[in-house]
Amino acid sequence: MTTEILQKEGLKKIREDYQYLITLFKEMLINIGEKDLAEGLPIDNFSVKKTTNYSNEKFTQAIGMCFELLNLVEENAATQYRRKSETQFGIASAKGSWGCTLDQWKTEGINESKIAEKIRGVKVVPVLTAHPTEAKRLTVIDIHRELYLLLVKKENPNWSTSEQSRLKQEITSLMERWWRTGEIYLEKPRLEDERNNLMHYFNNVFPEAVRLTDQRLKDAWVEMEFSPELLEWPEHFPLIQFGSWVGGDRDGHPFVTPEFTASTLRLHRSLMLKMIQKHLVDLAGKLSFSSFQNEISPTFLIELEEKAILFGSKGEKALKRNPSEPLRQYINLLLVQLNNTIKDSCTLGEGSYFKSSDDLAMELKKLRELLINLGAVQIAKQWLFPIERLVQCFGFHLTKLDIRQNSEYHEKVISQLLVASGFNDSDYGSWDEEKRLAFLNEELKSKRPFLVEGVSCGVEADNVLGYLREVKTYIDLYGTEGIGSIIVSMTRSLSDLLVVYLLLREVGLQDAGLPVVPLLETVDDLIAGPEILTSFLKHPIVEKQRLNSESFVQEVMLGYSDSNKDGGILTSRWNIYKAEENLTRAANQFDVKLCFFHGRGGTISRGGGKIHRFLDSMPPGSMSGQIKMTVQGESIANLFANRLTATYNLEMFVAGTARQSMIEESKVIEENRDRIMDEIVEFTRETYRKLLDHPNFIEFYTAVTPIDVLEQSKIGSRPVRRTGQRSLEDLRAIPWVFSWNQSRFNISGWFGTGSALVEFQKKYPADFEQLKILAKDWPFLKYSLIQIESNLLNSDIEIMNAFADFVENPKIKQELMSLILNDYNNCLDEIEEIMETSAEVRRISKLDDNKLRNNSLRALHEIQIDYLTKWRNLKDSNSKEGDGYLMLLLLLVNALSGGLKGTG
């Protein structure tokens, strides 16, 4: 069987499984009295029949559910395709997997010891955020998870007729529950709701996904016939940790209070300690080694007695519970120690509780060594390894909480501190960089704070110092293990970073060693990034940290969303690529390892896409082996809601990081390649800014997108705008992308590229031929063009033109639509010419997926445009009729998001 045949089988499976679910959905609707509605749903040729026999509201809800059913079907089909492919073609057949990566290295003749060393040096940190891009309610997400499991259950070919019937009944019952559950948020989710959603993944999904990802690596290692002793114990495996922004991200989020930060940190720790407790209890049940049948080391037995004495009566009970079973007794004592840790009970003195997860890790390693000495190596690998790995990856903190705030907010804090301290010249925000640096450098020589603790000096200062004091309280109790990075969004200069040290000094954290991280977001900031980093690394404060640490790593965060909004997709991607190269060179001057933190969103416009392709498109030599990456909003459920999908995506992340870190920086300076890209991007940015800087652009944008509807939605706890001002600059990048996607322009994913390529081809025909060669051999360019093409294929000219009718001024409409449509058509043609084959040949799966969705999407857009017209005519009247249209428009946002497989 060839891959082409397998792919065709996969597409056939999608259609068949979708038909199966739609048939059951229709049956369910008929059973509850919705026969007319059921007859309008997509089944024959995937077309829809819209009639007046049922309401638009019900039709929208039904089509939205059909889209979600299709999404679940596609996810399951992808998993089954990978299984079949691996069975047919071997473990190395899945692109980006551990099997593929190890096979590639082996083929290249890389020594297995070097491979093992490289794997040990890998550290990946997916960071979950709750940015407002998850349109589905948490209750509905839970129903999706249940339905997906039933879909997987259906894969069993051996079910009897009655079992198949029961399965259908389970599915239709779940569908009815879903139908009767409201689809949209009636109120904005509370921060607690968003946090609870994330806790599901940290608590229930990721520990198992790490275990299965490790198993994938072990299986690939065995398949390659590498030495087994090089990959046996947790310290041989890549370090997989997790981060969170819920409770720590404050950039434009006024509801994240110091108290919420404190409760979040406590919750993380509490959940993790209870998880470890459960695993230790399970382990005790497995290690029923009798001292009569196993010769236990006298040293171990002495330590057992000493531990029991330390714990008094509790220690005595721990030994009595399992007489003559010393391993169980030992674990019982560890459980006493852990219980003291859970209760923060440290009154019994040293050793009565675990000061950190490292202490427990050492105890577990002693247990491992004992098992190895007894010859029970397999027992250690089977039962002890999982809990050792759990502690290694999750510690006692479960997930690291990043703290993020905007540099402009910090400026207000400093001004308030200066006023409270009696400075005459207190308007810090108006100072130039030279004056700021002189002030900061002088102040940072001293350890005295500006204020006596408890003194209030302004809303911003009280907020920042309040949450930093909560961080200080946590660190004093438990160490820095649960704290991630202090991230400064909109970092534009060295002073933006040094300010953080001044604020840390104010609460007594100046020596805590917390990582201070620049977030480079706009195109100009990405260009300035290497200079900022150089100044930062040679500053005395950072230099001291570097010299005092054996494993100093500097984290730098790169923003995909704002740089896209600033200059368009190709400008954004190319400037991020160059920033990675130049930042790496800047760090190399100081012999410093960089950890890039990629602020990717779910959509292509905001850095989304296949993880392994994204990693492969990075500059050679820029990957140190350590990486962080945001997983935002709806992407969390898309990537991790279901166990095997979560394992696949985690494997792609870890294996891709390892693969990219093996690639050394090219000794050849690609001057011609860089010149070509610089020219194209210059043309791109020029066209892009021509649109955004048009004097009537805001009027056009607010007419042709439903941004006014999105501003009324209850998706996410965070406001749509940073400060509430109605300007393009203040609009967050997420609703910017979301609004263009809803009206099918998808401008943020392609605009500017078509005209740029036409202009480039006209001006530099020989270089254009070179560009064709680059598109074949250079992962960055190939990946970028394919992503841009995907956005073009998701756009719809018919819908664009329908939304353009909202523009009242015909001159503005004609002028800007002409600019947009011209670029759209040029872009499709130019990419086809560069790739030298049509999308119909190259993008079979994508186009097939579009066919399943297009008719239903257009039916929804027809209703959307009708209701948007009526609502806009009524929205200023505060009428009940207007409110009714708004509710329906919000339902349409949800349904269209499912059909388009994304929001912003």
Image: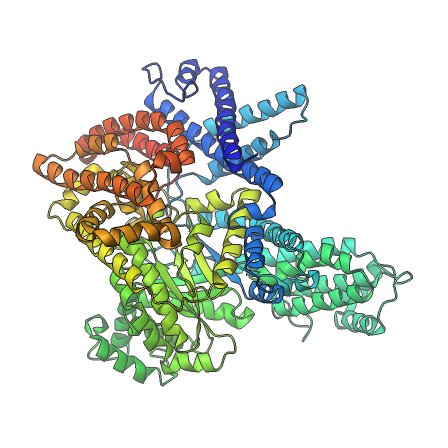
In the image shown, does 72 or 474 lie closer to the viewer?
Answer: 72
Q: Which residue is drawn at 43% across and 29% down?
A: 65
Q: Where is residue 340 in the image (x, y as percent from the top left)?
A: 66, 65
User: Which residue is pictured at 44% across the width and 75% down the height?
Assistant: 592
Q: How many marks?
A: 0
- Relative vertical location of residue 744 with respect to residue 695 in this rendering, above or below: above
Residue 538 rendering spot, x and y as whole percentages = 36, 80
Q: Position of residue 497 (x, y in %)?
A: 34, 72
Q: Which color scheme did the rendering employ for the protein?
A: rainbow
Q: Which of 760 and 645 is in front in this view?
A: 760
Residue 143 seen in render: no
Is residue 455 toward the left or the right of residue 281 in the image?
left
Quick check: 658 above or below 209? below
> Foreground residue, 496 or 593?
593
The quadrant in which the N terminus is found is: top right
Q: Position of residue 143 (x, y in %)?
A: 51, 34
Left or right of residue 372: residue 154: left
Residue 865: quarter of image: top left
Q: Which image quarter is the C terminus in?
A: top left
* Residue 309 located left or right of residue 483: right
